[in-house]
Image (tube, helix red, strand yellow):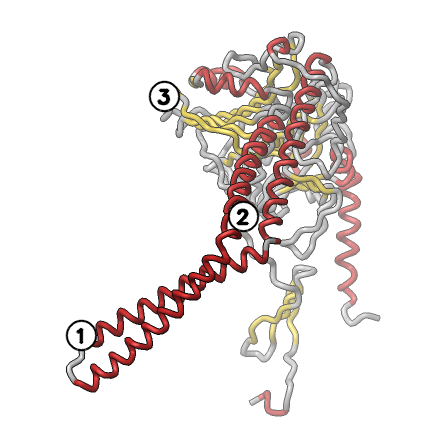
């Protein structure tokens, strides 16, 4: 029998509790909702276009472009590790992922939304915020939605639950008419699987719009041709560099010439130093030593000059060859830079565009494929007045592919409320029984009012219209861009009046089984982090005199 019979009881209890949570998470009518009331369809007709997470209601809702929705329970960050309220996007997807912060914890069906460690993944749902900042999902639910989400999908985290609403406004970008764009011969195109972990960016879905599909195929063909051209330029540049590196004989002769130049310069410096010593000599003995030093310097200088003449003659032809080769390398590098820029521009024409409008900074930022494209100044009426945070998402084309359907979600924030890890657990459990199933709709009038306050230069509008595909988004906010908005990310906006616990850099957790300090009763306290408890034990004496 084990020395500690309770050691195996706690893990089994956790397993049974976790099983109960997963079973309870199956799609079913919400508690507190009458069975005879019509419930919204819990299905997605296609890929999810938007995810909305409510911290207060501990719920996630995923919406597609056709109005379908699926909902599930979550467990967000506990006190001190709060899941941040703001605007994010899916940056990475992995079916099997292991945490590098918390003792290699399993994170199945992981969908990362920040590179600092916040993600959506399957995990235990105790009924209240309990994670280290991630959004835990029921295992079955996480598995079911994994194939429905794509990299780049917007994830909006709000204090209160809120549903998107359709919106139309002249400021929202419109695509260029298909007839205004020259079409090349289309090639075969495979949009890929939404669950493919090797995918890196969100690609637009145009299967219902033949004209736009032909345009996308043509643009992809052009992008591929320019990418191939860039690869040729890179190979040429690399071949020239390898040729330069292989010219060992020529490079050795040039290096020998350079060493001879340096030797002659040192000999000339020694001669000048000897002449100064002669001029400053105050005794015949010092003058004699200085003259001998000058004679040696003159001999060394003559020898160095002779060697330099021979080295220069030997390096004359190699110098010409290497100089021409370096000129070719410089030209190839410039051509490579131009080809890469053209390939990147062609690739961007096939990707949705992300736009961030900062009301306070009065700047517009554009990103595509999680990389910055350009920024420009804009005008915002009454910038000191709050404008809120509104997220507009392009759902699909309309009007024969010459317009776009948009929806909008406005983030709800209630900074007065703070979750108490212990006092609010029962409150969350009680609230779950009476929670309304349907979240309130976003106030479209407030979103339209925010759009009316913004003026974008016509040049920027024309440039943006080249990249308006389903999946594009516009964010208007009086918040600044988060420091999380960096390389290989879309725009990340975090509410400044909400806790940022999960975004703080956290050191790696200490290893389990650490000894605490001794107390005056001769006992010490033993920390077993695997089961989150302390045990009081007698001290162990290593020698006869340890008691002293």
Alpha-carbon distance for marks 1 and 3?
78 Å
Does residue 160 show up? yes
Q: Position of residue 313 (x, y in %)?
A: 47, 57
Where 319 sits versus 418, above or below? below
Q: Which mark is residue 382?
A: 3
Asked whether 3 or 83 is in front, the reply is 83
Where 72 sits versus 40, above or below? below
Question: Which one is in front in this view, the residue at disc 1 or the one at disc 3?
Answer: 1
Q: Residue at x 63, y 38 (%)?
A: 91
Q: Which mark is residue 279?
A: 1
Pick out the residue farthest to the right.
1
Q: Position of residue 102 (x, y in %)?
A: 64, 54
Q: Position of residue 480 (x, y in %)?
A: 45, 34
Where 494 sits versus 18, above or below? above
Of labels 3 and 2, earlier in sequence is: 2
Q: Which mark is residue 321?
A: 2
Asked whether 405 or 241 is in front, the reply is 241
Q: Residues within 10 Å of mark 3 (few under 14, many from 20)?
A: few
Of labels 1 and 3, earlier in sequence is: 1
Quadrant of the image for the C terminus? bottom right
Alpha-carbon distance for marks 2 and 1?
47 Å
Q: Residue at x 61, y 49 (%)?
A: 243
Question: Which one is in front in this view, the residue at disc 3 or the one at disc 2?
Answer: 2
Quadrant of the image for the N terminus? bottom right
Q: Quadrant of residue 178?
A: top right
């Amino acid at each position: 029998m084990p020395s500690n019979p309770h050691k195996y009881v706690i893990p089994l209890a956790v397993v049974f509790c976790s099983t109960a949570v997963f079973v309870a998470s199956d799609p079913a009518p919400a508690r507190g909702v009458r069975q005879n009331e019509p419930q919204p369809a819990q299905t997605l007709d296609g890929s999810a276009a938007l995810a909305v997470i409510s911290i207060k209601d501990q719920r996630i809702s995923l919406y597609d472009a056709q109005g379908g929705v699926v909902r599930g329970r979550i467990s967000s960050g506990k006190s001190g590790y709060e899941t941040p309220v703001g605007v994010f996007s899916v940056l990475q997807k992995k079916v099997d992922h292991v945490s590098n912060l918390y003792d290699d914890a399993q994170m199945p069906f992981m969908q990362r939304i920040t590179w600092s460690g916040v993600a959506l993944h399957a995990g235990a749902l105790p009924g209240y915020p309990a994670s280290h900042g991630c959004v835990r999902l029921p295992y079955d639910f996480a598995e079911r939605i994994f194939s429905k989400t794509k990299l780049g999908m917007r994830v909006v985290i709000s204090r209160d639950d809120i549903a998107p609403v359709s919106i139309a406004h002249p400021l929202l970008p419109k695509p260029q008419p298909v007839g205004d764009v020259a079409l090349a011969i289309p090639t075969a195109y495979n949009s890929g699987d939404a669950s493919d972990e090797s995918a890196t960016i969100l690609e637009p879905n145009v299967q219902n719009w033949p004209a736009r599909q032909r345009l996308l195929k043509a643009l992809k063909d052009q992008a591929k041709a320019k990418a191939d051209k860039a690869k040729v330029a890179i190979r040429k540049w690399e071949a020239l560099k390898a040729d330069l590196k292989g010219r060992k004989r020529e490079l050795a002769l040039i290096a020998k010439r350079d060493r001879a130049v340096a030797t002659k310069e040192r000999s000339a410096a020694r001669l000048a130093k000897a002449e100064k010593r002669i001029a400053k000599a105050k005794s015949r003995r010092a003058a004699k030593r200085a003259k001998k030093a000058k004679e040696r310097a003159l001999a060394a200088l003559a020898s160095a000059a002779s060697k330099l003449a021979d080295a220069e003659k030997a390096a004359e032809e190699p110098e010409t060859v290497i100089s021409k080769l370096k000129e070719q390398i410089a030209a190839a590098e410039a051509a490579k830079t131009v080809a890469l820029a053209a390939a990147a521009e062609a690739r961007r024409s096939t990707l949705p565009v992300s736009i961030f409008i900062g009301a306070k900074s009065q700047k517009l930022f554009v990103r595509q494929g999680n990389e910055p494209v350009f920024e420009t100044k804009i005008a915002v009426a009454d910038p000191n007045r709050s404008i809120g945070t509104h997220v507009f998402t392009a759902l699909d084309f309309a009007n024969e592919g010459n317009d776009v359907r948009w929806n909008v979600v406005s983030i709800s924030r209630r900074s007065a409320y703070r979750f108490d890890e212990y006092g609010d657990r029962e409150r969350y459990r009680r609230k779950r029984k009476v929670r309304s199933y349907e979240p309130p709709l976003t106030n479209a009038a407030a979103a339209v009012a925010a759009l009316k306050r913004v003026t974008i230069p016509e040049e920027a509008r024309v440039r943006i219209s080249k990249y308006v595909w389903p999946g594009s988004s516009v964010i208007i906010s009086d918040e600044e861009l988060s420091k999380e908005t960096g390389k290989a990310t879309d725009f990340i906006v975090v509410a400044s009046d909400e806790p940022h616990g999960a975004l703080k850099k956290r050191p790696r957790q200490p290893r389990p089984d650490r000894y605490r300090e001794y107390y005056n009763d001769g006992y010490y306290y033993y920390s077993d982090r695997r089961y989150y408890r302390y045990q009081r034990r007698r001290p162990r004496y290593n020698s006869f005199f340890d008691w002293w």
